[in-house]
Image (cartoon, grey):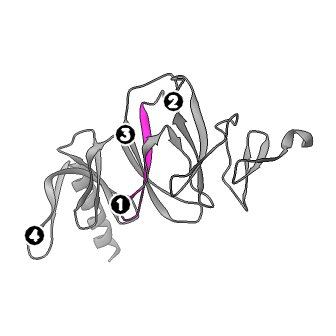
Amino acid sequence: MKRITSLLLICCLLAAMAGPVSAYDPSGITLLPEDFSHVTYLSCGLYSFRLDGGPDLGVMNVHGDVLLDAQYKWIEQRPTAEGEALVYVAQAVPVTEANESGEIWGVMDAEGQWVLPCRYIHIGRFSEGLAFAELPHPEASNQRLQVFVDMQGNETLCPGYSFTSSRFSEGLAVMGTQVINTKGDVLYSLEQYGF
């Protein structure tokens, strides 16, 4: 049994590396067209794919229904601190002084519905319903706005904090040397304790 499982795994890996793939259900109905390639399971019932070996990625569900056309630079699955599966999607944009990566990120849920649109230079991992995120500054192309964003897209501005942040735990997070609450209020400084 172990040998059969290993052989099946090797066949699947070889097929995935070979480029274009297709899949059919037992009655012969096409589930995955032949022009799909590099199909990757995102561990939440969704798959990323490329068309004809191209560079851009899309998202489809387990039935082969395309939820996002292949026009995205990067797609990855990241769970929240509480274990909920989310799909992070990066769209290519022009490189700027504030956005050296040339990416803006958005977030989808496990059903393929947008939670946050692609507009963030960075989105951290959600914890207690909030994630640290950075937006292009609307008035200064070389700066970023730093916010906490919830799953409904509500943003709380947190100016002056560095990118290095912790996740929320019991309603608190460390931003630089400051301990803040979920509203972005500074509760106290760690500098008074020698940090």
**Secondary structure beneath label 4:** loop
Q: Position of residue 27 (x, y in %)?
A: 9, 76
Distance (Cα) linking label 1 and label 3: 16 Å
Q: Position of residue 69 (x, y in %)?
A: 25, 49
Residue type, mark 3 in image: Gln
Does 45 lie within the magenta span?
Answer: no
Residue 194 in sight here: no
Q: Which mark is residue 91?
A: 3
Q: Residues within 10 Å of mark 3 (few under 14, many from 20)?
A: many
Residues rendered magenta in the picture = 102-114
Distance (Cα) linking label 4 and label 3: 32 Å
Mark 2 or mark 3, which is nearer to you? Answer: 2
- The residue closer to the viewer here, 118 or 84, is 118
In the image, taking residue 8 as reference, residue 129 lies left or right, namely: right
In the image, taking residue 182 as reference, residue 111 lies left or right, namely: left
Distance (Cα) linking label 1 and label 2: 29 Å
- The residue closer to the viewer here, 104 or 6, is 104
- The residue closer to the viewer here, 77 or 37, is 77
Q: Which residue is mark 1?
A: 112
The residue depicted at 56 percent of the width and 47 percent of the height is 124
Q: Residues within 10 Å of mark 2 (few under 14, many from 20)?
A: few
In terms of sequence position, does the residue under pointer 1 or pointer 2 come before the other?
1
In terms of sequence position, does the residue under pointer 1 or pointer 3 come before the other?
3
Q: Which residue is mark 4?
A: 29
The residue depicted at 70 percent of the width and 34 percent of the height is 160
Q: Position of residue 120 (x, y in %)?
A: 48, 40
Q: Which mark is residue 138?
A: 2
Reply above or below: 15 against 27. above
Quadrant of residue 57 within the rendered picture: top left
Secondary structure mostly taken by the magenta-highlighted segment of the chain: strand
**Secondary structure beneath label 3:** strand
